[in-house]
Image: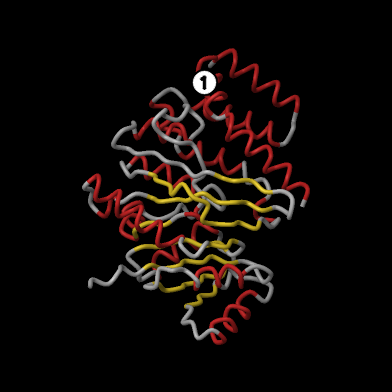
Amino acid sequence: MQKKPLVTCAFSTYNAEESILKALKSAISQTYENKEIVVVDDCSEDETVKIIKEFSLKYNENIKIFENKINVGIGEIRNQLIKIAKGDFIAFFDDDDYSFPSRISEQIQFITNFECKNKIDYSLSPLCYTKRKISYSKKNFLICNSITFDTSISSKDNGALALLSAKKIDKKAIAGSTATCTLCVRKKTLIKLGGFDQSLRRYEDLDLAIRSLMKNISLISVEKILINQFYKKKEYKNNAELYELKLIYKYKNFLEKYQLFKFSLNFARFKISVFNLKILSIIKYFLYLSLFYPNNFFQKIIGSFRTLLFSILNKIFINQI
């Protein structure tokens, strides 16, 4: 019987002494047996690394731990994990999440089925996400869908434009999250994409999805909740929305090709104003977009309604923590 391909459970950690054990136990408990566990710690100031080492000894698990001497940010950590990983597949884990036991098995099966059905090369293998439950407290939680976008049936450029707040998503696609904590993907695909953008400390996951679509790599999602994210307030998450503006400037030439740069930029500013309840800014950008881009604006509003509602609720629940 042919041995199943090796999967790297890739952990990024930072000041996670309260949650890392639960996350590690979820990796060890995966029903998929041929796996390795790799951790890159981004210069934690608490007991995170000590806890991981003690856990590794206690459970006789050969966890590979790499410690950064300075804090480099999530984009660079992800790239370190890609370089270190020996697996054919990489499943990314966050330090405050719990992955259900069947997560890896289901995602690998979903990827290989998609490859077989579409007869595609491994370097064009899809990025595979999954639904997740975000728990803010015992009472407050949200169910977060992940994106589905098949480039064989929908325009890849239109998909990238939709992720850049410039167009509504194709009717044959499903709008949703691109969170790396739900991602399982072939290492060859990540290498082809050049890994993550190290200049982005947030929205590096959205950037990866955009570049995937532009290179004709599909985004797929297992339509099951396979991850429970226990949300914790962390300083590096503050003002995360501003990185979306940085991302839009990164793709300025691509957006200008479709004459959508100004629309994308101002729609993103409109969203940020809504999330932060800045009434004057909301009115300002609403009037601007309604006047100069009426069709695009109202199509995008209608197409993004669920995403906008989710983001607003997410902001409310975070503020209650």
- Location of residue 156 by image quarter: top left
Horizontal side of residue 83 vs 298, given as left or right: left
Q: Residue at x 42, y 74 (%)?
A: 36
Vertical position of residue 313 compared to residue 72: above or below? above
Vertical position of residue 157 compared to residue 117: above or below? above
Vertical position of residue 26 compared to residue 146: above or below? below
Give residue 251's position: percent from left, percent from top: 44, 37
Dot 1 lies on which element? helix
The 10 Å Cα crowd at callout 1, few under 14, some 14 to 19, many 20 or more, is some
Q: Residue at x 32, y 37 (%)?
A: 151
- Location of residue 169 by image quarter: top left
Q: Nearer the viewer, residue 6 or 30?
A: 30
Give residue 202's position: percent from left, percent from top: 56, 50
Horizontal side of residue 235 vs 133, given as left or right: right
Q: Nearer the viewer, residue 146 or 29?
A: 29
Which residue sits furthest right?
320
Q: Which residue is mark 1?
A: 299
Q: Nearer the viewer, residue 282 or 99?
A: 99
Split into 4 quadrants, where in the image is the N terminus? Answer: bottom left
Horizontal side of residue 278 vs 73, given as left or right: right
Which residue sits furthest top?
291
Give residue 310's position: percent from left, percent from top: 62, 38
Horizontal side of residue 91 vs 54, given as left or right: left
What's the amino acid at mark 1? Gln
- Location of residue 25 by image quarter: bottom right
Give residue 99's position: percent from left, percent from top: 53, 62
Q: Residue at x 51, y 66 (%)?
A: 11
Q: Residue at x 69, y 69 (%)?
A: 18
